[in-house]
Amino acid sequence: MSGVVTGDAVVLGLQPARLPSRALAVLIDLVVVWAVYLAIALGLAVATASLDEAAATAVSIACFLLVLVGAPIAVETLSHGRSLGKLACGLRVVRDDGGPIRFRHALVRGAMGVVEILMTFGVIACIASLVSERGRRLGDVFAGTLVVRERVPAARALAVPPPPPWLVGRFAALDLSAVPERLWLEIRQYLTRARELDPFVGRRLAERLADELVARTGTPPPPGVPADAYLAGVVAERQARDARRAFSSVESAAGAGAEASAGGVAPVVPHVVPHVVPAAVPAAVAEESRGRGTGFAPPG
């Protein structure tokens, strides 16, 4: 499985989408967009029949730009890279670092897509994807994005390893509200690939992520805690909080259902699947993580 390479030369656990799945996703998007465009264009043609030729042409151009160019850009921005076709094929557009795309990324992709896909019937996009090592078209290259597979088989999915046993519960009072999703994503990707990295590169990346996490939480870790163990401990604490919130919502729904049943109304309890914390790793791995050290010196 190939991955995304960050500026620290770290391979992230993302699998670039192949050309056939990308082409199918684009085809689905084009069918939907063209159907909407033709319906709107037909309605506008009837509504603007009394206008002169110049006004009708201006309306047609505006309709083309808004529906065939603007709509895909808006959909990718609002859905964070999941258009209808990509959602159906299990794909998603992400940044090179694995984070969610923003408006500027979708804008560049959409503008280049007019030339790559609409004007050349996808020929340029196909050639660029075949030449690119990670299957990127020109719009992805200029926007700094990548189309990846979201639905990876469970057997190939990488789980975040748990922290050493001596760190479990040590971060229960930590304020995680200011930690952005981008940083959580980078930390999880590092933890899933940490054992495959060069020791020096892995230690440097762990220290950078740990320093940024400390800056976001405002609380330094316990003295002597290695950077990689600190990251694993904080991620485990967040997973535990997510699980508690999920169970609380189930209990609240069950309580409301019991009250409704007492009043003669059948309860409706939603099915919530809590986040499952991965099983513990052998003690030897924890000792290795603690013993080798990372050089992480938490701010004091």
Image (cartoon, helix red, strand yellow):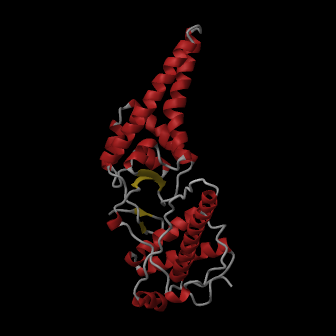
Count of labels shown?
A: 0
- Residue shown at the point (46%, 68%) measured from the top left: 189
In the rendering, at what x and y percent does residue 122 appear? 35, 36
Residue 229 appears left or right of 280 = right
| Quadrant into which the N terminus falls | bottom left
Please provide percent x and percent y for residue 256.
Answer: 63, 60
For image coordinates 58% across by 63% down, the residue present is: 254
Q: x and y percent of residue 260 in the render?
A: 62, 57
Q: Is residue 61 above or below residue 18?
A: above
Q: Which residue is drawn at 55% across and 40% down?
A: 74
Q: Is residue 220 left or right of residue 95?
A: right
Q: Which image quarter: residue 139?
A: top left
At horizontal 57% and vertical 76% (from top left) the residue drawn is 237
289 relative position to 196: left or right: right
Split into 4 quadrants, where in the image is the C terminus?
bottom right
159 and 115: which is toward the camera: 159
Q: Nearer the viewer, residue 4 or 25?
A: 25
> Residue 160 occupies which quadrant of the picture?
bottom left
Residue 92: % across, % down: 44, 51
Residue 159 picture quarter: bottom left
